Amino acid sequence: MATIRDVAKLAGVSVATVSRVLNNQGYVHEDTRKKVEQAIRQLNYKPNAVARSLYKKTSKSIGLIIPDITNPFFPQLVRAVEETMYEAGYTVLLFNSDEVLKREQHIIDLMVTKYVDGIIIVSNTIKYEHLKDLSIPIVALDRVISQEIPSVSVDNYEGARKAVRLLIGKGCKKIAHLRGPKNVFTAEERLRGYMDEMNSQGMETFVYAGNYELNTSMVETMKLLTENREIDGIFAGNDVMAVGAIKAITKLGIHIPDQLKIIGFDGIELGTVITPELSTLKQPIVQLGKKSSELLLNYINGNEKVLRHYVYQAELIERDST
Amino acid sequence: MATIRDVAKLAGVSVATVSRVLNNQGYVHEDTRKKVEQAIRQLNYKPNAVARSLYKKTSKSIGLIIPDITNPFFPQLVRAVEETMYEAGYTVLLFNSDEVLKREQHIIDLMVTKYVDGIIIVSNTIKYEHLKDLSIPIVALDRVISQEIPSVSVDNYEGARKAVRLLIGKGCKKIAHLRGPKNVFTAEERLRGYMDEMNSQGMETFVYAGNYELNTSMVETMKLLTENREIDGIFAGNDVMAVGAIKAITKLGIHIPDQLKIIGFDGIELGTVITPELSTLKQPIVQLGKKSSELLLNYINGNEKVLRHYVYQAELIERDST
């Protein structure tokens, strides 16, 4: 009698893919689906009912893996996911990974044993190869992991260009960029946006290394303004770094926005709490959380058959720092 | 043949209490335990093995109910709980309740059906009567719900007195209190500390209503300083309100700390981000999360037999606002 392995072999796909087709779960390419269905017919494969029901075991819960809830970008995002899931009758298992790959993999293994129905993950370290054999739906949030994993994110590149254009439009002549950490998707995209916009305007670029954190950003800004006294505009890779920069600028006695203008990225609440209030490219954080949840639910319920990537535009918010 | 109900009746306790004794789970008073054990012997009660194993079904997960993860006090707390639980092999189901009693009750019901092994709850609305029939361990965090529910909290009253004493020591003559919301345990305790310390020093009291939020606090501070121009010290019921107050004070052109000193409560990171940096009574947030998790694990594993209440002292942190 034919087994699931025979079907996989004949169709030239993984066992996980056959599982996905059998359970009508998640994102299988239409061509692949047809190949699998043909192999099933050809071999007269009958899935084992007990195994299937065991496989189908559902917990009405999903796993949410984020780098760190104490990073001010995440509370709103987590809240939006939790609310959308709660309304749909699902509970949320929350994990902080610090983007340590080993931990992420352990968390994912753990979730599989808990029969979670799906996973939403925010990660720069996890790659498609770590996820491709999983038989549960996964949605990448905030960052695109691979074309094969559905995702919900923001157009960081275009947002960065908008930020730089605003500074130029306000008369800034020397604009520096406090970049986010290397190999982090959002940081690389925002850097690329800065470089392209500056180059297209024929302006000199000044890039300083930050890591999305406040204290490093203060130190880096001090250095930046000591080395280049003529800098009159800063595009910070995120709001947290912008807030650090503002602390440093204020300490140096430089007036914002008269002598120096600064703009961030993210639109976290912190930007409205400080003085001067921070101009920024606001991500639709709540919408990102909501959409990723809805997308995951659609995959779980089999309503979503094709791979989807949603990209939102960040909104330019002008406050007192530009 | 005797049932669990017969045992409960004879011992004069609830069925849930008998369950707790049978499963050696959670906080049953020693006297009660003895009464139940005596009734079991007297009736020769034999618990049904299947029912018991069903009852004992465990998910190696716990529920964590907080008011709102976007309140800056909670991310650190949630992270500490998640880490401690993760290390112990437990996952965390996170819920935002907004302290709406109906929602809290629904969440608890949901968690019972999910066989969570225990619950950590931060709530002002839930009362002992809503929890007393639950057969799973519960720990109250940040706030004491009742003497019958184990808890981990901070001495808000004493912390408030310390805050007021600092302002007095710095020469403040007219000290106002921006209080937190009514009927909220922490807010009431901090108000009581303010009143007692002021009264003991024979000083006039000025209490203004806040609700632990930033914007209301700005408005209230404007009102306060317009009505009482001679106020030279403010004890804000939490750091978020203190930050709102500082925004208002800065707008009014009043210099901190020369003309007016201000101190908050909580020790959230926000206080170090703003200018001037905020003096505060720092709660050991990470320790609170960790201890509540350990306490819950002890109850789950049956190591903790008696009801415990842990109270931590808040630490006075002087920064630039006093």
Image (tube, coloured by chain):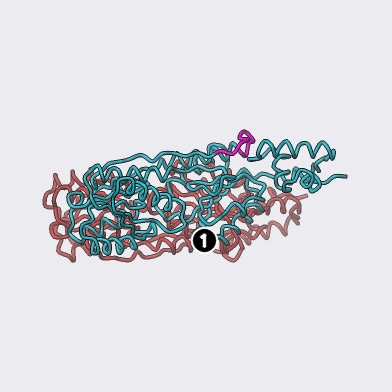
Chain colours: A cyan, B red
Q: Is residue A197 visible?
A: yes
Which residue in the structure is indicated by mark 1?
B83
Q: Position of residue A16 (x, y in %)?
A: 70, 47
Q: Is residue B143 left or right of residue B216?
A: right
Magenta highlight on residue A306: yes
Q: Position of residue A231 (x, y in %)?
A: 23, 56
| Residue closest to the eye, B196 or B32 | B196
Label 1: which secondary element = helix
Q: Amino acid at mark 1?
A: Glu
Residue for point 33% across, 40% down: A316
Quadrant assignment, res B275? bottom left
Prevailing secondary structure of the magenta residues = loop
Q: Which residues are magenta?
A: A299-308
Q: Residue furthest front?
A: A202
| Residue closest to the eye, A7 or A115 | A7
Q: Is residue B13 visible?
A: no
Disc 1 chain ID? B
Q: Can you say whether A28 is above or below A247 in the image? A: above
Residue for point 66% across, 44% down: A58
Q: Is residue A222 left or right of residue A281?
A: left
